[in-house]
Image: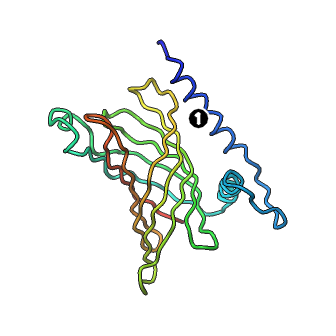
Amino acid sequence: MIVNKALQQIIGGSILMTASVCFASSTTSTEQQPVGLWDKFTQNVSETWDSDQYDIYLPVLTWHNRFTYDREKTNSYNETPWGFGVGKYRYDEDNDWHALYAMAFMDSHNKVEPIAGYAFQKMWVPGELDGFRMGAGFTLSVTARDDYAYIPIPLPLPLVSMEYNKLSLQATYIPGTYNNGNVLFAWLRWQW
């Protein structure tokens, strides 16, 4: 298989980024405050890794935007992403959600697609609704697909959620071009 130079650079960069995140120092000190964005990011990843709170992920929906696909394509795609995932999470002092997760599910072509990464959501409690929260944020992840020979692909995406107590419905939208991408992906998350 011939891989062009730009793709090699993207893959190499994503591997370096992932390695940097994975090997970030897990020690935190009250005397040492994050200086820049990278320091704050690595501290958040480290604190989340050290968390003793876990969650499970259950993919429930893959919806291909009908305005951006031919009917023949959408009729042939799998939109039931059977799969499972696990993660570690924490809420910070501002009640914002942080997580490290790994999940695998059946993609649009019924092939296994793994994904792993870090997620952040700014959380809001609407009014006086006890136990109910809404969130918006992002995930920085790496995935691999059968149609790309399972080459690791960096995947930064938006993230939204509605949560009640320990159950959350989370979703992201994968942008794309005509007949490619433009997918709403949703899953349930249970915290224990």
Above or below: residue 99 compared with residue 107: below
Q: Amino acid at mark 1?
A: Ser
Q: Residue at x 69, y 41 (%)?
A: 20
Determine the secondary structure under disc 1: helix
Tell which of 59 and 143 is nearer to you.
143
Looking at this view, name the residue that lies furthest to the front.
36
User: Seen in the image, is 160 located left or right of residue 108?
Assistant: right
Q: Position of residue 82 (x, y in %)?
A: 35, 45
Of all residues shown, which one is farthest toward the bottom? 128
Q: Relative to residue 86, is residue 169 drawn left or right?
A: left
Question: To which quarter of the image does residue 77 belong?
Answer: top left
Q: Is residue 157 left or right of residue 66?
A: right
Residue sitting at x 43%, y 70%: 134
Q: Position of residue 17 (x, y in %)?
A: 63, 39
Q: Which residue is mark 1?
A: 14
Q: Nearer the viewer, residue 88 or 73?
A: 73
Pointer 1 local density, CA inside 10 Å: few below 14, some 14–19, many at least 20: some
